[in-house]
Amino acid sequence: MSNLTGRTRLGISAALSGERSGWRSRLVFAGPAIIASVAYMDPGNYATNIQAGAGYGYKLLWVVFLANLIAMLFQALSARLGIVTGKNLAELSRDNFPRPVVWAMWVVSEIAAMATDLAEFLGGAIGLALLFDLPLIVGMAITAIITYAILVFERQGFRPMELIIGALVGVIGLCYLAEVLIAPIDWKSAGMGILQPALPDSAALTIAVGIIGATVMPHAIYLHSGLTQARADLRNDRDRRKVLKYSNVEVVLALAVAGMINMAMVMMAASAFHQGHSDVAEIETAYHTLTPLLGAAAAGMFLTSLIASGISSSVVGTMAGQMIMQGFLRFHVPVWLRRLVTMVPAFAVVAAGVNATDALVLSQVILSIALPAPMIALIIFSMRRDIMGEFAAGPLVRGLAIAGAGAVLSLNFVLLADTFGVPIPFLGG
């Protein structure tokens, strides 16, 4: 996956050998976390964050914050796995787990990849359809064409792909910076929403699990290990420590930006919709409601960011799907075929007349249910000294990773119990 240009490889070698120093030498290592961060700003986040802000104001901001912290930890561990071992998570799973477990992980991962693509594809298509007054199916076709055109750039080396994705992330960030400046945010309530955890009722629980599913993404955990596995020619542990240092800094910065964008989504929805429009739960309704409330500019930026999110995350989802299949099965498929297979469910959902935003939220819940498999596998490999050597996770990191996985598993269990009518004592009804 790390098909870097010759110039980038030379820059990395010069930085590792000490021939180059300063902040510019560090930039050559940047890219993997930026690519992975796109998964944390995909259209599924829009759907769950709009529902969280409109329905509960600022009360669920703590879920976004917690999910982002968990994401930082697991993306850092994923990057470390690829840097230290030279293999990605799917390859290590294939080599170390029993065959039935490998097959089960692959099936679950493919389902998660399809759920991911459903969210990404629908998001970009909804944005295009609303912005240019097109039928949704036409918006989906345009999204497919643009996505494939960007994927073709990988033939020119991976660095151009990183720059394109980085530019799209920049568009999303600038749009939401403008949204926060336009919307009258209650910053005191926002601060309380981050610091005081609360789940007002069972519907809030469903949205909270959807936020977890939209933030901590299974395919991003697989992908990050692959983006770092052969990025540099690491001759010794000194080189590995140096690259790990740069990687950790990039993960924190990239996912901090993603986290702030997610919180900005919730705050914008809380500010615009919670008082008087708390029933807003769909992207289309949010767009039409934003225009009279905050003006055409705010509504236009909302759609622009949604389109950038849908296109960039669809590209990243296709890359992750290829890596998962190759890692588990040692089977390579052309990018156009992979793109076709994962987007079929999205076209099927639209053709069946399913509500697009409902499908987005459901896809995020599916992702949250699928998430434990790569999380647990990553924890296991990160702890094993026979795989990681001196870079095996220490007691503190192990404890935090197990606690993060436990939080996700617990939310999943509570959601399933609530779905099947089992009383949840701490929910307000």
Image: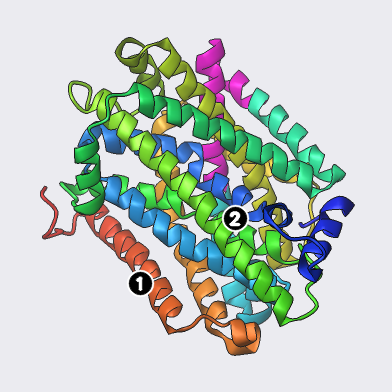
**x and y percentages locating residue 112 in the rendered image:** 53, 53
- The answer to whether 367 is drawn above or below residue 301 in the figure is below
Q: Amino acid at mark 2?
A: Glu
Q: Would residue 123 be seen by someone viewing this image from the given angle?
A: no
Disc 2 and disc 1: Cα gap in Å? 26 Å
**x and y percentages locating residue 53 in the rendered image:** 28, 35
**x and y percentages locating residue 131 in the rendered image:** 53, 15
| Left-right relation of 81 to 287 | right
Quarter holding residue 292: top left
Quarter holding residue 235: bottom right
- The answer to whether 404 is drawn above or below residue 419 in the figure is below
| Left-right relation of 3 to 103 | right
Tell me the residue at 77%/47% (across/down): 159
Tell me the residue at 15%/47% (across/down): 200
Q: Farthest residue toward the right?
A: 6
Q: Amino acid at mark 1?
A: Ala
Residue 73 is labelled as none
Q: Which residue is mark 1?
A: 403
Please tell me whether residue 122 belongs to the stretch shown in magenta.
yes
Q: How many marks?
A: 2
Tell me the residue at 18%/25% (across/down): 275
| Left-right relation of 218 to 354 | right
Q: Which residue is mark 2?
A: 110
Q: Magenta stretch? A: 114-141
Estimate how packed mark 2 is, as few (under 14), some (14 to 19) or many (20 or more) residues with alpha carbons within 10 Å: some
Locate the N terminus by quadrant: bottom right
- The answer to whether 359 is drawn above or below residue 241 in the figure is above
Viewer-nearest residue: 363 or 397: 397
Quarter holding residue 382: bottom right
Viewer-nearest residue: 352 or 148: 148
